[in-house]
Amino acid sequence: MKTFDKKFWIIFIPFIIFILMVIYFPYWVRDELLFYDFNDMGQIGDTFGGLMGPFIGIAGGILTFLAFWVQYKANEQQKDDLKIQRKREYLSSFETKFFELIRLHRENVTDQNYTKFGKTEMEKYQGRKVFRVIHKEFEECYTEIKRFHKIYGQSFMRNQYKNKLKSIIEKNKLNVSEEDFALIDLAYTFLFFGVAKDSEAFLTIKFKQKFNDDYFGKLVTFLQLKPKMQYGKMYNCWKYFINLNVLEMKPIFENIHTNRRVSGYEAHLNHMNFFNNLAVEKYYGGHQHRLGHYYRHLFQSYKFLFNENDLTDEEKYFFGKTLRAQLSNYEQSLLFLNSLSNLGLKWDLKPEINPITNKEIRLISEYNIIKNVPGIQVLDITYKKYYPNVEFEFEDN
């Protein structure tokens, strides 16, 4: 802030003109009144002094005003400097907290590890590579559920759940169906919790109000037939089964599901007792212990940023972009899938409300968190259909 700004000059210039006129006035009087007898000039001087006294008082008042004006501007400058200092101190404090959250996020990524059987041996994945492997497992799970859905997908949802999904779709103006949403929810939830026996009871309770019992019970059994890859012959038997025509798959699976609790039952397929697949470790063992803490921390980091009312929208977006830069493309794609499941709707599609501003906390749309997803879709799940307001990187290209 400048002390002598536009307002100052508007006042000061006329004042200078006035002073110059006052100084010149005696000479003008002298030149004009030379024909008078200067013996009478005493009276003229008294008259002049009487006339000029008020003007001199006014000039003094103006000078006093100008002195106060300068002091006022100095005080304003001091206030602005204090605001700038406080802003800098606030930003410094905020940045310290925010970059600590980023550091913890990076530690969460670094600590990720996943040992899984590859083509011929056990392989260990660490850090960001884990998310790519998990993403691949989602693709497999979703594809297999779609295959199962071709057989048993008629009227699979309960009306209450269907209406809930319809409400979310309409509120967010999405160009998708309730069925699309439900299948993504199923695939991601199975991926997250797994289909082992200790997860089955929990998942049954979780999905009881969403899907028909017969549909969900059969789907759990269907996915439990897929063993870990180290069970080579059993895994190959599953691959043979999943590639059958759906009309061939149905009777084989119906027999296994009906007799799943019968000890010693046999269901021969591809020279194997396919029924034995139910007794070994499952391919979908779950990733709750890997992803649970990861997503909770990431959500709270973005929510912390969103609720900082002393930051401008531009500053918030800058920090949000900085945190997004820590996420690999597959991390962003998995976050997209997480946000479409019942576990992650609060990220954007069913947001929380800020109690102070009464604003919806739509984190993904607000900060374009999934901007750098790989490609334009995951299988037949198109990113833009679910997040039309996100500015995706593939659109720039």
Image (cartoon, helix red, strand yellow):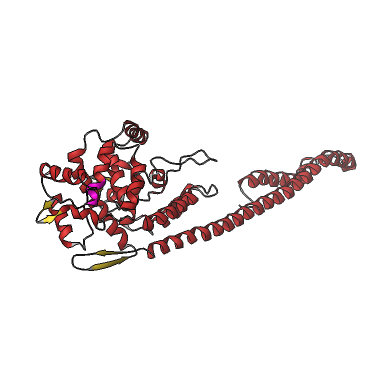
In the picture shown, does residue 180 fall above or below 289?
above
Asked where in the image residue 346 lies, by quadrant, the reply is top left
Give the image location of residue 102, x and y in percent. Answer: 45, 60
Above or below, 174 relative to 74: above
Image position, residue 285 (x, y; %): 30, 56
Q: Is residue 265 visible?
A: yes
Specify whether residue 223 is painted magenta.
yes
Q: Is residue 235 left or right of residue 195?
A: left
- Camera-side residue of 194 and 72: 194
Q: Which residues are magenta?
A: 220-227
Coordinates of residue 8 in the picture (x, y in percent): 65, 47
Left or right: 72 as drawn, with respect to 178:
right
Residue drawn at x 29%, y 44% is 186
Decide: is 311 above or below 354: below
Q: Between residue 87 and residue 388, name the one nearer to us.
A: 388
| View extreme (front): residue | 263
Return the x and y of residue 133 as percentages of the image width and height: 27, 59
